Image (cartoon, rainbow, N blue to C red):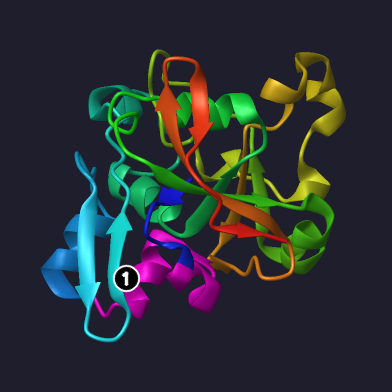
Amino acid sequence: MADAGSWQNIQKHGLLSTSSLLDLFGVKDRDREDIESSRRPECVPIVHEKHGRAVVRDNKAIIESKLRTALRNCTLEQWYRLLNKFVFFWLTLERLQTLLCARGYRDHPHAVPTLETLPFVREHEQRIVLSPMNSGNTQPIAHERSPETFKKMRDYPFYERAHRGDYYQVVELAVEGAADVTESVLSVDPMQCTGDGMKVLRKIYQR
């Protein structure tokens, strides 16, 4: 789920983690520190003379008092920096709809690329990690988490979690740095939450 106006830059540069986006846009010093190593209560727009405009998503779903008690083997700052290294993907429509219809996002359209899984995973396999939780959320429960929460596919406990069903077996797929979707994107749809769930406003791209 990306900013509504981001598809053109995604085609050029791929889907970028927060840290990679800050690199591309040349954001440095205190501005970068504020974005990369602390909680963002609101989305942060950034502008570049050549690359135009981009939006760094908020992480308002994190309650720091809860996160602090849930973290193991890292500090708050280290956790934020870790999350900002990754591009995150949902694996179920239900989780996409939950985010799309969250209070902070429901009133605005968002660009939603849909990817063909197998070619995407083949291309990015060495940089993919999986998580059994929403690592950027502490509500309603702040599950215990650490850098070891993110596991390579070969190390992930698929079979132990299979009985939980698709919604819980793997919660997040993340790619470190950037993810090229040129060969795997099936469609890009501007979507918005409605009273009936998700609504496609119009199609930007269809393979």
Residue 136's spot in the image, x, y percent?
42, 36
Q: Which residues are magenta?
A: 8-27
Residue at image coords 68%, 46%: 151
The image quarter containing residue 160 is top right
Residue that label 1 marks:
22
- 17 with respect to 170 (left or right): left
Q: Nearer the viewer, residue 76 or 131?
A: 131
Q: Secondary structure at mark 1?
A: helix
**Rendered-image quadrant of the C terminus:** bottom right
Classed neighbour count for the residue bearing mark 1: other residues with Cα under 10 Å, few (<14), some (14–19), many (≥20): some
| Nearer to me, 180 or 113 | 113
For residue 24: magenta?
Answer: yes
Specify whether residue 97 is painted magenta. no
Q: Is residue 31 visible?
A: yes
Q: Residue furthest bottom?
A: 50
Q: Quadrant of residue 54?
A: bottom left
Dominant secondary structure of the residues highlighted in magenta in the image: helix
